[in-house]
Image (cartoon, rainbow, N blue to C red):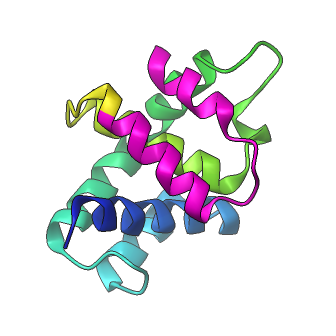
Amino acid sequence: MTQREIRIDIINLLYRHFVLNNTISQTKQEAFDFSQSVRTEAEINKVIEILDHLDQIIADISHNLKPGWVFERLSNYHKAVLVYSVYEIKELHTSRAIVINEALEIVKKYGEDEDYSYLNKVLDQV
């Protein structure tokens, strides 16, 4: 399993979290049940860690959005990509350049819309 596949698995579960407006406990249970795309215990542990810090991650993202923008205004897939990317930068200490490149490639391929240029700026400032 490649690192990109792991990212996509976790992003897809986070996307589901935002689309269904699940509680954190519901999303954690889905991760444990393997009912979604997470396939390994390492992925489950990452999802749990992200969800445990979700409020802080969202605050970090919100702080770096353009004036007048709020996190809730973003598309659900962009929310998921940003959340996982900020987690990678802050908690896993993955190179910012790698995270930004991966985020842009994933959102280009799977994103809901074409407007993703702000992702680069937000992630560069986190």
Residue lying farthest to the right in this orientation:
68
Q: Is residue 123 above or below residue 41?
A: above
Residue drawn at 16 percent across, 71 percent down: 41
Using the rendered view, name the quadrant where residue 22 is placed. bottom right
Residue drawn at 57 percent across, 62 percent down: 109
Q: Is residue 104 magenta?
A: yes
Front residue of this view, candidates 39 and 112: 112
Q: Position of residue 124 (x, y in %)?
A: 46, 19
Using the rendered view, name the quadrant where residue 30 is placed. bottom left
Number of disc labels:
0
Q: Position of residue 102 (x, y in %)?
A: 40, 46
Q: Is residue 36 toward the left or the right of residue 70 in the image?
A: left
Does residue 115 appear in this view?
Answer: yes
Main secondary-structure element of the magenta-colored stretch: helix
Residue drawn at 24 percent across, 65 percent down: 43
Q: Is residue 99 magenta?
A: yes
Q: Is residue 33 toward the left or the right of residue 67 in the image?
A: left
Q: Is residue 112 toward the left or the right of residue 102 in the image?
A: right
Q: Is residue 7 above or below residue 70?
A: below
Q: Quadrant of the C terminus?
A: top left
Q: Is residue 24 toward the left or the right of residue 37 in the image?
A: right
Residue extent of the magenta highlight: 98-126
Using the rendered view, name the quadrant where residue 65 is placed. top right
Residue drawn at 48 percent across, 26 percent down: 123
Q: Position of residue 101 (x, y in %)?
A: 41, 39
Q: Quadrant of the N terminus?
A: bottom left
